[in-house]
Image: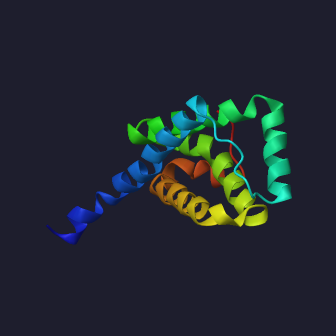
Amino acid sequence: MSTNSILRFVPTVLRLLLGLPLVAFGLMDLFAPMQTPPGLPEAAKAFSAALAATGYMMPMIGIVLTLGGVLLTINRFVPLALLLLAPFWVNSLLFHVFLEHSGLVPAGIFTVLELAVAWNYRGTFAAVLQAKNLPG
């Protein structure tokens, strides 16, 4: 098998490496929400408590993760899934950079996977990155 024939599977593998865990994490979040682990820094506890106090945020995270993961896994509406998931990745990465460092490596890995999959769909996002666009 040539290198080119192997490389053509890389986008699919990256998409599945991102999508499958998201389905699992999203479903776990919906049906068995995580409790705040002991030993979190006070700022991380306060942030998590504020999100939980809103009431809608935690189920919404599970729904978005599950939906995004399913779309990535079945290879349908992938750019939409990436857009739905982008705020989650930014928030997750910044949470671990500034508030709770032990999850920084997994958050970084998932952020890199998101960016790598998005790179494969860069043509779809080209218009969004233009300074001026015409409506319609």
Residue, far left: 1
Residue 123, position in %: x, y?
Answer: 49, 52
Residue shown at 66%/65% (left/top)?
102
Decide if residue 130 is in sight here: no
Q: In this rendering, is residue 55 above or below 129?
A: above
Task: Name the image colouring.
Answer: rainbow
Q: In this rendering, is residue 41 above or below 52?
A: below
Q: In this rendering, is residue 49 above or below 90?
A: above
**In which quadrant of the rendered image does the C terminus lie?**
top right
Residue 91, position in %: x, y?
Answer: 72, 52
Residue 7 falls left or right of residue 34: left
* Residue 20 location, quadrant: top left
Residue shown at 48%/40% (left/top)?
24
Residue shown at 82%/42% (left/top)?
49
Who is closer to the viewer here, 65 or 77?
65
Decide if residue 133 is in sight here: yes
**In which quadrant of the rendered image does the N terminus lie?**
bottom left
Residue 53 falls left or right of residue 104: right
Who is closer to the viewer here, 15 or 44?
44
Residue 16, position in %: x, y?
Answer: 39, 49
Q: How many marks do you count on the picture?
A: 0
Residue 47 falls left or right of residue 21: right
Who is closer to the viewer here, 8 or 43?
43
Residue, far bottom: 3
